[in-house]
Amino acid sequence: MELHQLLVVIDPTTENSQPSLERAKWVAQRSKSAIELLLCEYNSALDGGYFFDGPAQKKARDSLMENRQKWLNELAQPLRDEGLTVTVEVRWGKPLHTMILQRIDELKPDLVLRDATSHGLLQRLFFNNTSWQLIRQCKAPLWLVRPGAWKGERICAAVDPVHSSDTTAALDHLLVQSTTYLAKTLGLEADYMHSYAPLPRTMVFDSELVAAYDKYVDRSAKNHLDAFEKLMVNYPVEKANRHLLEGFPEESIPAFVKERGIDLLVMGAISRSNLENALIGNTAERVLEAVETDLLVIKPQ
């Protein structure tokens, strides 16, 4: 992973706050990356001729797009004044995720940034359909930015070296390598974490299995530890920054992120079955909804 070109998806409905733009500025200042601001607009009243005739409709749409272009340049100017390279792009069409994916295919950015909204008093992330579609289909690493203060101190990769869908651990190596690169480039301290959950005792009913349950737990812990250490053996990571967590990932990972003060959690998305779209699994989706930090989703190359 290298950072040369960032793509920032701008939300036209929130003119006063653009967290993803702030984060992109922070990243670009440290990585010397160029930035493109992308705004996708659509209004059914300007597409179909219900309220305007053809020429009037086109004029109204052109006026809207010019206004959006002007606004993007106003957002870009302070960054340009600081010496950053910033371009702008305005697109018309729907659905939103399709328009974003089209531009990603054209620009081939190294990183895509988009706002995620917080949900309720817990400040947890809430993803709408566009975010989930991008999580599943975006080919570039996708950084989902949470509103609020940004410390920019710690990054953590959540790996799963025993995942049956990734027998060669290729995705986990990519997560570790990307996290190491980002930590060095952006000046972050990096942690690497694997969470596993043995079968709960309450779900074991066979008498022989009950008697051997403690041995099973010990054997499970050893298998996960061995797999984790095998993954990390060729990376110069201090033991203090390697963490094996026991517990359901949707509980243990958010708790670890909060306890450790993680600012950016890096997770992987994998292909399942013969589906073309990438899925991240029910467990990972629950983790994404539960954490209280920025998220970076990476897919296999």
Image (cartoon, rainbow, N blue to C red):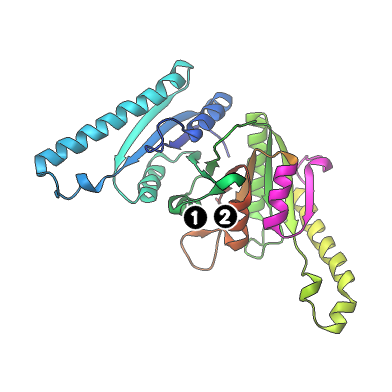
Q: Nearer the viewer, residue 171 or 91?
A: 91
Please tell me the numbered disc located at residue 204.
none
Residue at x-position 36% and y-position 25%: 73
Residue occupying the far front of the picture? 121
Residue 128: percent from left, percent from top: 46, 52
Residue at x-position 63% and y-position 48%: 291
Where is mark 1, residue-wise?
136
Which amino acid, mark 1?
Answer: Arg
Name above or below for residue 23 compared with residue 46.
above
Residue 213: percent from left, percent from top: 86, 73
Which amino acid, mark 2?
Answer: Ala
- Magenta segment includes 216: no
Q: Secondary structure at mark 2?
A: loop
Q: Nearer the viewer, residue 48 or 266?
A: 48
Q: Do the numbered discs 1 and 2 sit on residues whose CB atoms are within 8 Å? A: yes
Where is mark 2, residue-wise?
269
Residue occupying the far bottom of the picture? 207
**Which residue range is magenta in the image?**
234-259
Judge the density around disc 1: few (<14), some (14-19), many (≥20) Cα neighbours within 10 Å: many
Residue 70: percent from left, percent from top: 31, 26
**Which quadrant: the N terminus?**
top right
Decide if residue 203 is on the left or right side of residue 85.
Answer: right
Residue at x-position 61% and y-position 57%: 286
| Residue 160 shows in the view | no
- Magenta segment includes 243: yes
Q: Nearer the viewer, residue 7 or 252?
A: 252
Q: Count every numbered label the image shows and give the total.
A: 2
Decide if residue 96 is on the left or right side of residue 213.
Answer: left
Classify residue 203 by image quadrant.
bottom right
Name above or below for residue 244 compared with residue 113.
below
